[in-house]
Image (cartoon, helix red, strand yellow):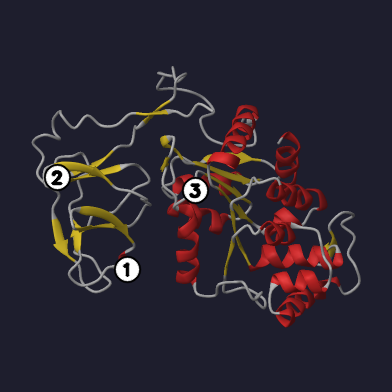
């Protein structure tokens, strides 16, 4: 697969040659100096002892701590008193910090018009090329990358989309999955009762007392002690959680104030959940977010626009897929400017994706 070419900055030119070393000030215990520098989604370089060094494993809205001549991206809540934090709000190289925003060049990018129609993502947008490109990326990253999925419960409310997602996991197109209590609960409810919030996931028929099904499922999983033991005890062999469990694919279920139960594997502490998610976004080469606005924004804000692999520096591909134009464009508005949005029905997206792969 041909990725856009990464073009490194030419540090032998101005203003890089004359720029001073990066400036730091000591942090407090859990708080930053007032003029702290905040990271972005792009490759960033810091001049230390006269040499420009790229920040590794970056992510946005963090600070940079210099230790033993090495810049390290750090969440502000993790800084300790005395940590040397980069300060200064200029990132053009003149203060020893450079953000390399235009680092990738598409071979066929010949667009030079400042005016154009239909530049946003809407229900009128053509997505044929995006689908074909996504198939190509996923086929490559199945063997050479790290694919992270972020799922809302709508993905398992339909029989075909639930089956399609499970098959994608079994075929190796998922290296980690992020979700909340709801996705896992309703997937397990479907495995046990064939319902999602009491509605048959194929016929849409409401079953008697169906509103109990998700609560009953949670209770049984909690009694079993884990999702895996629950699946074994009831001999269930369908769905997303079954596919994750049998393939030993890691997942992170982040808790919410609205959760029922929750399931045993749900991480109730938001910062522990954030830490667990970051372990996987650091490795991500492709991220696909489906029908979950808050989890999508959270994941997108943890994920840079680039990654370092054995093949070199390449883009991280982030997709936000939702039936709502507002939800699709929201992540872009929150700073993840490299996200690609697809406005479509989630069930259709997953079924089409699985069939074409």
Where's residue 54, x and y in %?
27, 44
Check contact, mark 1 vs mark 2: CB within 8 A: no
Q: Nearer the viewer, residue 171 or 55?
A: 171
Can residue 214 be seen here? The reply is: no
* Residue underneath mark 3: 284
Q: Earlier in the sequence, mark 1 or mark 3?
A: 1
Q: Quadrant of the N terminus?
A: top right
Q: Secondary structure at mark 1?
A: helix
Instruction: Pinpoint residue 196: horizontal percent, then vertical percent.
Output: 79, 63
**Which residue is rendered at x = 54% and y = 40% of the image?**
144
Cα distance between the residues tagged 2 and 3: 31 Å
Q: Hey, which quadrant is residue 252 in on the image? A: bottom right
Vertical position of residue 323 compared to residue 198: above or below: above
Give the camera-side residue of 309 and 345. Answer: 309
Q: In the rendering, which numbered label is found on residue 184?
A: none
**29 and 333: which is toward the camera:** 29
Instruction: Give the side of residue 64 with respect to residue 275, left or right.
Output: left
Which numbered circle lies on residue 78?
Answer: 1
Q: Which residue is mark 2?
A: 95
Q: Are marks 2 and 3 in contact (CB under 8 Å)?
A: no
User: How crowded is the residue under tag 2: few (<14 C-alpha within 10 Å), some, or many (20+)?
Assistant: many
Can you say which quadrant of the picture contains the C terminus? top right
């Amino acid at each position: 697969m041909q990725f856009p070419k990464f073009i490194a900055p030419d540090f032998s030119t101005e203003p890089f040659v004359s720029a001073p070393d990066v400036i730091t000030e000591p942090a407090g215990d859990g708080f930053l100096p007032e003029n702290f520098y905040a990271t972005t989604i792009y490759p960033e370089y810091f001049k230390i002892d006269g040499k420009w060094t790229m920040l590794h494993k970056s992510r946005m809205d963090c600070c940079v701590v210099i230790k033993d001549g090495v810049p390290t991206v750090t969440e502000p809540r993790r800084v300790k008193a005395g940590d040397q934090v980069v300060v200064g709000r200029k990132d053009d190289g003149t203060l020893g910090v450079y953000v390399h925003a235009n680092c990738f060049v598409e071979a066929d990018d010949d667009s030079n018009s400042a005016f154009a129609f239909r530049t946003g993502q809407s229900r009128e947008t053509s997505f044929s090329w995006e689908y074909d490109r996504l198939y190509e990326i996923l086929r490559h990253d199945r063997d050479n990358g790290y694919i992270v999925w972020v799922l809302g419960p709508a993905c398992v409310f339909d029989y075909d989309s639930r089956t399609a997602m499970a098959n994608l996991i079994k075929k190796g197109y998922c290296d980690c999955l992020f979700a909340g209590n709801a996705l896992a609960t309703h997937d397990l409810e479907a495995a046990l009762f064939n319902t999602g919030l009491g509605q048959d996931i194929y016929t849409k028929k409401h079953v008697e007392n169906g509103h109990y099904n998700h609560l009953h499922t949670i209770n049984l999983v909690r009694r079993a002690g884990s999702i895996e033991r629950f699946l074994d005890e009831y001999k269930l062999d369908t769905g997303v959680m079954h596919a994750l469990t049998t393939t030993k694919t890691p997942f992170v279920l982040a808790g919410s104030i609205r959760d029922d139960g929750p399931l045993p594997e749900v991480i109730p502490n938001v910062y522990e959940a954030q830490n667990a998610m970051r372990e996987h976004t650091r490795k991500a080469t492709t991220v696909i977010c489906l029908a979950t606005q808050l989890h999508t924004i959270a994941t997108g804000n943890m994920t840079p626009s680039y990654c370092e692999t054995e093949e070199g520096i390449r883009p991280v591909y982030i997709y936000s897929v939702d039936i709502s134009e507002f939800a699709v464009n929201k992540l872009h508005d929150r700073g993840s400017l490299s996200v690609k949005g697809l406005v479509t029905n989630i069930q259709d997206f997953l079924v089409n994706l699985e069939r074409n792969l």
